[in-house]
Amino acid sequence: MAVATEIQVRDKLYIGGEWVDPSGSETLDVVNSTTEEVIGRIPQSTPQDVDKAVAAARQAFESWSQTSLKDRADCMRQISGALAARSEEIGALVSQELGMPLKLSVQIQAGLPTMTFGSMPQLLEHVVWEQEVGNSQIVREPVGVVGAITPWNYPLHQIALKVAPAIAVGCTVVLKPSEVAPLNAFVLAEIIDEVGLPAGVFNLVTGTGPVVGEAIASHAGIDMVSFTGSTRAGKRVSELAAQSVKPVALELGGKSANVILDDADLQAAVTDGMAKCYLNSGQTCSALTRMLVPRAKLEEAERIAAAVAEQTKVGDPFEEDTRLGPLVSDVQRERVRGYIQKGIDEGAKLVAGGAEAPDGLDRGYFVRPTVFSDVKNGMTIAQEEIFGPVLSIIPYDDEEDAIRIANDSVYGLAGGVWSGDEERAKRVARRIRTGQIEINGGVFNPLAPFGGYKQSGHGREAGSFALEEFLQVKSMQL
Ligand code: NAD
């Protein structure tokens, strides 16, 4: 059942190892995306709260950065264990905030953060902390106080991707989670408190981007900002951080192409590609939203895609057979419906779904699983990130044309290539300008570096590359 029994009121911030009152009295509501009911309330922090959190993090940095690898690795193991123990609760919470089907939510929204924290002890062992170059000793040191700003679509996963490696290498953190799905961040703060991380190593401030996010990005006491979210907000964060020349890591939007070559198994490729487009109701930065098929196979691909869309059960994320839950909010639903209408108006061929509400679902932020075919890559639906269950099938003439279309995007986050010949697929994949790319549906690897080319951002998260992001390099000449 998606109905919350009582509203979760979170009226304190976690700063300096304590739950403290926010300096203001303003609050923000958290809404269940299926029932449209308020399920939670959080503080709208102020820049003064950010000052307090930064001061606590600065103070903690002096000693935390000097702790042993073993001590930090032990903390990571404990956090991972506590997350695992609360995985059902976290999964259900995120399903309410966001609408992802429960089973998947437990696996992904709770499972990935557990894995990320749990992977740190081993990853820490592989960092090259010291090396000799001629008469120099090169040492790696934690970058300092990290400001982490995260989105709502994989809320705790995005948090863990920053907080775990930052803390593991000896940084301290001020986190501002998304105000749209923030309740899971409080669970992490509770766990960190129980585990007994020293005061100030991890601090939580909540609220909106323009108030709290901008205070973090421009704060003189923060050494680095790690941001995940829209390209629009990422640009603003960069501008603000530039004033104090802070390093910024940006994980931004995408419009990823799934290139199905003429020798691929079309049924398998289209079916898998649809799943990669519709995951989390299409609210996935690396979603494969542009499906490139040989012109001669366009009709067949359309038929397969339409059948998959029609069989995709839309509904309550707490029902066993639901494959597609609602979108996160009414704003997001209206945006996505607007894009569907735009696709129709610009002349794309609608083969499944549409802009109207799905049958029998008058409540909740639902959108029909939608497929457009014969899409031109210049159309709005092929260029802009929609962040909903909307697939654009784009025909191409030959392999060169497919590569050109795949690269004809301001984004460069992810992609896919399908071929009967893996070497051919890899050759094509090397020419697509994105940070990650799957061959014949290769499964997501949570330890592989994740990040973008072009306006999808810079920097890499996950696995050993994530640790590098939070380290500075010092050379001592002997
Ligand atoms: P968003 O940009 O609206 O918000 C992301 C975070 O930034 C939130 O915490 C928000 O409060 C904050 N924010 C907003 N405006 C800000 C400002 N002016 N200054 C500082 N902070 C600000 O994005 P969203 O709607 O929460 O998430 C969806 C977007 O995130 C999509 O574009 C998606 O592609 C992207 N995303 C990227 C990745 C990745 O790894 N590349 C992963 C997940 C999501």
Image (cartoon, grey):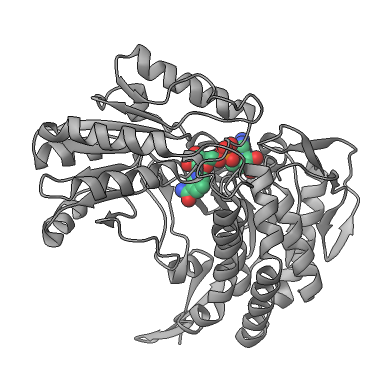
Q: Position of residue 290 (x, y in %)?
A: 31, 36
Image vertical order of residue 289 relative to residue 475, above or below: above
Q: Quadrant of the N terminus?
A: top right
Image vertical order of residue 352 relative to residue 51, above or below: above
Instruction: Give residue 159's quadrant in the image.
Output: bottom right
- Tell me which image quadrant ligand 1 sits in: top right
Q: Position of residue 283 (x, y in %)?
A: 50, 41
Which residue is at the front of the view, 180 or 125? 180
Horizontal relation, residue 266 to residue 205: left or right:
left
Horizontal relation, residue 163 to residue 309: left or right:
right
Q: Position of residue 254 (x, y in %)?
A: 40, 41
Q: Position of residue 428 (x, y in %)?
A: 16, 51
Q: Is residue 224 visible?
A: no
Q: How many marks?
A: 0
Q: Is residue 38 visible?
A: yes
Instruction: Give residue 110's quadrant in the image.
Output: bottom right
Horizontal relation, residue 15 to residue 360: left or right:
right
Horizontal relation, residue 412 to residue 199: left or right:
left
Instruction: Give residue 422's quadrant in the image.
Output: bottom left
Which residue is at the front of the view, 427 or 199? 427
Q: Residue at x 60, y 59 (%)?
A: 106
Q: Quadrant of the C terminus?
A: bottom left
Which residue is at the front of the view, 34 or 409? 34
